[in-house]
Amino acid sequence: MSRYEPSKNLGAYGDGGMVVTNDDQVAEIARMLRVHGAKKKYHNEVWGYNSRLDTLQAAILRVKLPYLEQWNEGRRQVAKTYNELLADVEGIITPEFADGHVFHQYTIRVLDGKRDKVQKYLGEQGIGSMIYYPVPQDQLPVYQGQYPKMPVSDLLGTEVLSLPIWPELEPRNIHLMIKVLKKILVD
């Protein structure tokens, strides 16, 4: 997690994050990486980071953590409602449900080159949306030339659009957003 964002499933009020594992080896590596790659202070064994969670952020996350599964279930319900309402909309592909998916983002595919037009219209109607990761990973400067062409990634980079999602998003607001979305796709 990074800065407080309402889109995060479990957000702090500043920089913060957590690694959860039941694998002792993964836990040891994570502990080393968070303190510059050292098990013992000033005895760095691997490249690491300065990624220690400060006490205030830890306290906030500790209070919020018991609600995480409830919030995740709320996100799943919102995603389910979106999927039901968008099932018959031509030009939209909705995300599939998979066990454990908690919908940090609810990302649809808008087909036929209409994604940017749809996003603009939603914004004009006061509905926020985001295009996360618009540049495929293989095209980032750090990776350029290291991988073969990725035509699926290229295509998805032009189609993905994330709609608002949070646990308490009310069905009436979801219905309103879908009504607006359908209007622009029919025109």
Image: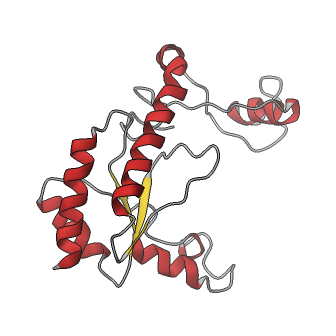
Which of 95 and 42 lies nearest the eye of the viewer? 95
Q: Residue at x 35, y 85 (%)?
A: 112
Residue 180, above or below 20: below
Residue furthest to the right in view is 25
Q: How many marks?
A: 0
Q: Where residue 92 sits: x, y (%)?
A: 38, 71
Which of 42 and 88 lies nearest the eye of the viewer? 88
Q: Residue at x 42, y 53 (%)?
A: 106
Q: Residue at x 77, y 32 (%)?
A: 32
Q: Which quadrant would residue 13 be assigned to in this image?
A: top left
Q: Where residue 76 sits: x, y (%)?
A: 48, 42
Q: How is the image coloured?
A: secondary structure
Q: Where residue 56 sits: x, y (%)?
A: 47, 15
> In the figure, is residue 33 to the left or right of 101?
right
Q: Quadrant of the C terminus?
A: bottom left
Which of 154 and 87 lies nearest the eye of the viewer? 87
Q: Which quadrant would residue 78 be assigned to in this image?
A: top left
Q: Where residue 122 sits: x, y (%)?
A: 19, 62
> In the figure, is residue 151 to the left or right of 74?
right
> In the figure, is residue 55 to the left or right of 185?
right
Q: Residue at x 52, y 26 (%)?
A: 68
Which of 167 and 14 lies nearest the eye of the viewer? 167
